Amino acid sequence: MTEISELDPEDKKIITLARSARARNGVAEGAAVRDETGRTYVAGTVALESLQLSAVQTAVAMAVASGAKGLEAAAVVSAADEPAAADLAAVRDLGGAGTPLLLAGPDGTLKVAAEAR
């Protein structure tokens, strides 16, 4: 497993942003993605009666809606032990296979560094 101290500073940044989104919005998950130009998009879980999106799906949608053509990396802060298949699919759809998805716990500790397939 990759230690958070070994991560690139830009990857540490998106974990911090994801953690902040989770705390600020009081949601189950916070996520941040970095597009091909270095811009970041931060989001929380969307849990409406008519619309259910994970934090990663919401952040990817925000990036697409803002004109992003690709992703360099994504991060999610969650109590989960593994990244959700739907999150990996969303990252792959915009970033391509091999785009990293970093899963950190609520305290910011990196649990899993996965690649979208």
Image (tube, rainbow, N blue to C red):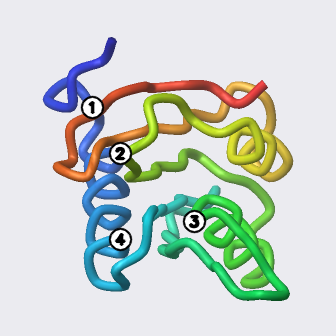
Indicate the amino acid at tag 2: Asp
As drawn, 10 above or below 39: above
Residue 38: % across, % down: 50, 62
10 Å crowding of disc 2: few (<14), some (14-19), many (20+): many
Indicate the amino acid at tag 1: Leu
Work out how far the residue at label 3 is from the one at label 2, CA to CA, in angstroms.
17 Å
Using the image as rendered, state which of residue 27 and residue 73 is in the foreground.
27
User: What secondary structure is marked by label 1?
Assistant: loop
Lower position in the chain sequence, tag 3 or tag 2: 2
User: What secondary structure is marked by label 2?
Assistant: helix
Q: Are marks 3 and 2 in contact (CB under 8 Å)?
A: no
10 Å crowding of disc 3: few (<14), some (14-19), many (20+): many
Which numbered marker is on residue 22? Answer: 4
Lower position in the chain sequence, tag 3 or tag 4: 4
Image quadrant where residue 89 sits:
top right
Lower position in the chain sequence, tag 3 or tag 1: 1
User: What secondary structure is marked by label 3?
Assistant: helix
